Image (cartoon, coloured by chain):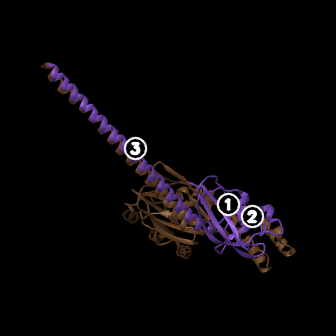
Amino acid sequence: MKKGISDIPFKWIFILIVGALIIAFFVRFAYQHIETTNKINTRQMIYNLDDQLNALSTSQQSNKYIDIKQELNLSCGSLNSLDFKKSTEKIIFSPSTLKNEKIAAWTLSWEFPFKIANLYYLSNKNIRYLLIYDTTTFNYVKNLQIPQIFNYQLMDIKNLNQNVLQRSSSTLQQVNLIFFTQPKYITLTGPKVNIVVVNITKKDIKINNKHYTYLDEPLLYGAIFAPENYDCLYEKSLAQLQFISDIYSQKAYYLLIKVNNPLCKSKLTISKNTLDIFKTLNGIILYQYKNQLESQNIELLKNDCPSIY
Amino acid sequence: MTAHQSIKAQLEMTETIIVLFIFLIILIVSIFFYYQYSISNVKKIGQETLTTSSSVLLSSISSLPDVCCNKENCIDTIKLLAFINNNKDYPIFDKKTITIEQIYPQPTSDKKCTPLLYNDINFPLNCKKFIIHKTEGNNPQIISTPISLYYPQNKQYGIGKLIIEVYP
């Protein structure tokens, strides 16, 4: 009779162990399923973003909102979310992190003097841009073409007040203060503050005490939207400028082979030489060669020669 | 415990194990089918993503600064030759063969356009296609669109076809 009684607890222990194993299996299965779904969603989000940016690039200038489901991290050469990283050749000026929400995207064709690349600017409503001017820079700042989808305002330096700024920006992720005048150094509790000082006569940008040249407005917008990554993105833009200049230099060479008119030959040779120097340069001197290339191209067109661009 | 009771207990235990065994078999079969379904679903999503990005590429390649005309919406054939010569590889070209075929004026040869053939007096009629990027593979999905081609050496325009072969 004692043996018969001891059979029942054994059966329950057996059921308990098997039941625990089955539950553990299902829990693990559920976690794996969630993980896989997240991975798929992340990849879809990144590919979708990349496609939308490619579609934007077909126009000279356009902007739109893009929905993202997860936090997006952007570095100089890649788009990342969770464990997925997609390398990109695009030059994207953006804060390092964009939280999961609607992001504002803008693209602009950068021509220096020919089309170098489409530059992209990403941001969201939690990042505020204050373009601070004085009487001498007001007209320049007023004419900057930043789309209304971004959270930016123009402000006279006389109206810049730390307390007012603190109250209006305390819930934000980041505030970028762009001084087109002598800067006032401001600290805020809460949002991260980036200070950029622009000298429009010298085409110079100062970020964290480091000076950079900006090559026309598209790169100035880059400094406004991504001061923390400007160093690397400027280098990437310059590399693209050098690559495209090399393509045009080769184009001049191929045209020289086919052109018989001596005047055209001479003008194309001059343009090719300018391009060969242009592709090796960096900094403010690029403006001088850009102007030369523009006038040389006009000369080619005037003389009915094949033009460089 | 009688012999009859012992046999009954053993039978109950065997019954439980058989039920558990059948349950496990059903579970394994269900998981197998679930994974099959999941894998095919992921493959389908991957294929759709690849097709979408190829369609976007198809419309955006003619605005790529490396090959586009400066103002008009066309492909500059000399820049195209220079670009092919430089052999630059973009991540967006991954798993794709990208070709531009000349349609009009109709070429007299099926050859691939190269800088060497450009030097020939008969260019652009002496070659048919510019290969921007080549990927080896089987059963590609092919999409194409007509494009405008510009020949700067004689300031003439032609018609071409941009073909993208997408490999799964």
Looking at the image, which is closer to me, B34 or A217?
A: B34
Of discs 1 and 2, which sits in the foreground?
2
Q: Is residue A182 above or below residue A228?
A: below
Q: Chain of mark 2?
A: B
Q: Colour of chain B?
A: purple
Q: CA distance from mark 1 to mark 2?
A: 16 Å
How crowded pointer 3 is (Cα within 10 Å; few <14, some 14-19, many 20+) is rated as few
Q: CA distance from mark 3 to mark 2?
A: 50 Å
Of discs 1 and 3, which sits in the foreground?
3
Residue for badge 3 = B32
Who comes first in sequence, dot 3 or dot 2?
Answer: 3
Residue at (24% x, 32% y) in the render = B16
Q: Chain of mark 1?
A: B
Determine the residue located farthest toward the left in the rendered image.
A1
Residue for badge 2 = B110
Answer yes or no: are tags 3 and 2 on the same subunit: yes
